[in-house]
Amino acid sequence: MTILVDENFLEVENLVVGYRGEPVLDQLSVSLREGEVVAVIGPNGAGKSTLLKCLAGIVGARSGAVRFRSRDLSRRTTEARVRDGLALVPEGRHLFKNLTVEDNLRTGHFAGRQGHSADDVYEMFPRLTERRQSLAGQLSGGEQQMLAIGRALIGGPSLLLVDEPSLGLAPLVTKSVFGVLNELASSGMSILLGEQNAYAAMEVADRCLVLGQGKIQFEGESRTAEGQKRITDEYQKMIDVADR
Ligand SMILES: Nc1ncnc2c1ncn2[C@@H]1O[C@H](COP(=O)(O)OP(=O)(O)OP(=O)(O)O)[C@@H](O)[C@H]1O
Ligand SMILES: [Mg+2]
């Protein structure tokens, strides 16, 4: 069987995004092939969340182009992008803390795209099955992260934008969340990850992009020990610049 891979899956060209004053992302370009897992790593405030929010249509771009499956996204709303197959798992999870696990999953249907059923999600995250009647606010951090990923899957995405999944999680819990991302990747899901934790990111990513001063400063393949060493060295340089 031949599987056709969309080479023009996600293309970001010369993107300029900012809030006020100087842009946060300044002429940034990134591309991702279908089925690829790419991590954007960078220190605090580098603009990882800004990039992912811009792709999801939450933050507007000043200039530049974003194309998904060769379609220009600039005039598409967040809801339309969800229908196109883009889903954001936001930093901090943004769950409805006073709703149950089950009801949080239901909110994943908002854009009307048929994706995974709640049963599919429970199968992927057996821990959530046990907690389906619990309020989201009563779950552990790791369970909340799995619920946030599960909710995004309900929309049937083909590209998952995952922002800082390791946030506030103990190393072992981070490992299990990244295990889930790895399983999704093996099933063919394309993932663009924003992470401060380079070691966690390299567990799942095919490529890592080091973000600093508004641009991708380095791009490296993260499947080999040598590649990983170069990525961590380049990342350290960015942290040193940010700390100065
Ligand atoms: N809503 C906003 N209004 C104004 N400035 C903002 C806003 N959101 C982010 N910024 C600024 O944009 C820059 C990039 O922030 P962003 O959250 O994208 O970085 P990040 O790489 O995700 O950082 P972190 O690792 O802390 O999550 C920072 O200087 C931040 O203060
Ligand atoms: Mg962030």
Image (spheres, rainbow, N blue to C red):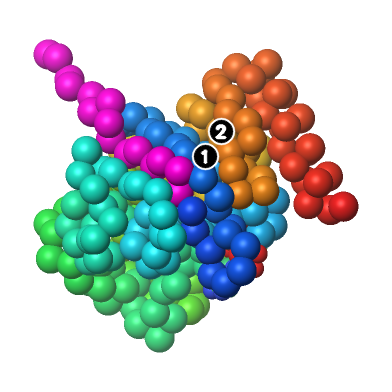
Of 214 and 240, the residue lying toward us: 214
The residue that mark 2 highlights is: 208
Q: Amino acid at mark 1?
A: Ala
Place of residue 100 in the rendered image (x, y in percent of width and height, measured from the top left): 34, 78
Neighbours of disc 1 within 10 Å: few (<14), some (14-19), many (20+): many
Q: Is residue 216 magenta?
A: no
Q: Amino acid at mark 2?
A: Cys
Q: Is mark 1 within 8 Å of ligand 1?
A: no
The residue that mark 1 highlights is: 39
State which tag comes first along the sequence, 2 or 1: 1
Q: Is residue 186 visible?
A: no
Residue located at (35% from left, 59% from top): 56
Place of residue 179 in the rendered image (x, y in percent of width and height, measured from the top left): 48, 40
Q: Is residue 108 visible?
A: yes
The relative height of residue 192 versus residue 130 in the rendered view (above or below) is above
Locate the N terminus by quadrant: top left
Q: Residue furthest bottom?
A: 98
Of 143 and 59, the residue lying toward us: 59
Q: Which quadrant of the structure image shows residue 210?
A: top right
- Left or right of 43 on screen, residue 137: left
SS of the residue at dot 1?
A: strand
State which region is magenta. 1-15
Residue located at (64% from left, 35% from top): 217
Place of residue 37 in the rendered image (x, y in percent of width and height, measured from the top left): 43, 34
Cβ atoms under marks 2 and 1 closer than 8 Å: yes
Neighbours of disc 2 within 10 Å: few (<14), some (14-19), many (20+): many
The relative height of residue 170 versus residue 130 in the rendered view (above or below) is above
